[in-house]
Amino acid sequence: MGFKYFGAMVLLAPLLGGCANLGFYWQSVGGQMEIWKREQPIATLLDDQTTSPDLKRRLESVLRMREFASRELGLPDNGSFRKYADLERPYVLWNVFAAPKFSVKPKEWCFVIAGCVSYRGYFSQSEAERIAEDQRSQGYDVFVAGVPAYSTLGWFDDPVLNTFIHFPETEVARLIFHELAHQAVYVKDDTTFNESFAVTVQQEGVSRWLVENGSAEQRAAFDAAQQRKKDFVQLVMKYRSRLDELYRSAISDSQKRERKRQIFSDLQQDYTQLKASWGGFSGYDHWLPPQANNASLASVAAYTQLVPAFQRLLAAHDGNLARFFRELKEIAKLPKAERLARLEGR
């Protein structure tokens, strides 16, 4: 066993937790080791005559994005996204979200260093589905989502993966900026803070990338995508509030169950109308499937709920990301309630 792999076992053990998480720990170590076995320096692939021209073009673009991320966005300048790995599967991870039948708040799983998070990531889809079924048997609403990229929070250098390299250029940039943002600021026990922060950075980063590198057509497409995302999030949060109000009410469980069914039916109808206004765009279908439930709505909220607050804070710093990061690192030290109040200006 090489030192790198031994190091993974030593470092990931406290990251993932103790005996109760032993199975999860081993699959995480195995998944990370498989990525390392497959990764190659991008520079090597660019010099390799057998590398396809299309992949070379995309990897060259990634290196420009990587340099831009550190130079213009102040994101960590390290070995992340300077290697490439083909995993021969569509996703690197499958995240499992679970929420009680009558709650919009997701279940949390806790680990020593990463803290408590509102999902568990599995390198095997079958394992993710097995855990999902176990959660369902315990009475939880469950949602499983494929993930094209993830961050080791700076513990290791994260590579570019086949799971996203063939996405449109703006999507590749979005993922790189998002995952690097997790290395810049990360708060234990606060998934919504971490994901909303990373989404804010990715949006600002892609916008700036397009100003410098994008075409008018790409900028227009990005603006349209941002508007669709805003529309989708507003819809989800509207219905999440309705559900929260229902679950807090004093009516019987049978009444809650029936009204819950009706609320989700109304949500699907409104979503169908929203898609029609987008010209049939269906990119959010996976996040809001016909069997949408508390867990799928919680997954959307985790990535978006605090984005407006982060955007206001960035605007207060006149878009200066260095100052923005510095203040957030101070905010991150506060207890959760104080942190939220500070972000929301209370």
Image (cartoon, rainbow, N blue to C red):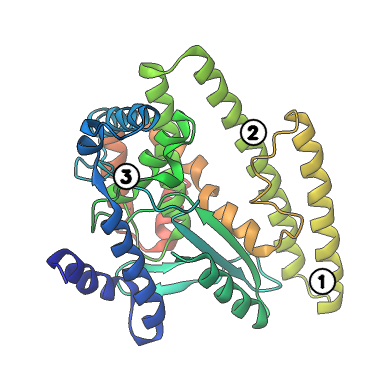
Q: Position of residue 121 (x, y in %)?
A: 46, 65
Question: CA gap, disc 1 to disc 3?
Answer: 42 Å
Q: Position of residue 139 (x, y in %)?
A: 68, 80
Q: Position of residue 101 (x, y in %)?
A: 70, 73
Q: Work out whether residue 252 or residue 78 is closer to the camera in this orientation and state it.
A: 78
- Residue beneath disc 2: 228
Tell me if mark 2 has few (under 14), some (14-19) or many (20+) residues whose alpha carbon lies within 10 angstroms of its own.
some
Tell me if mark 1 has few (under 14), some (14-19) or many (20+) residues whose alpha carbon lies within 10 angstroms of its own.
some
Question: CA gap, disc 3 to disc 2?
Answer: 24 Å
Label 3 sits on a secondary structure element that is helix
Residue 291 image-quadrant placement: bottom right
- Residue beneath disc 1: 256
Query: Left or right: where does residue 243 sit relative to residue 221?
Result: right
Residue at the top extreme of this rendering: 216
Circle nearer the N terminus (2, 1)? 2
Q: Amino acid at mark 2?
A: Arg
- Identify whether 74 is placed above or below 259: above
Q: Work out whether residue 141 or residue 3 is closer to the camera in this orientation and state it.
A: 3
Is the Cβ of the residue at disc 1 closer than 8 Å to that at disc 3? no
Q: Is residue 315 visible?
A: no
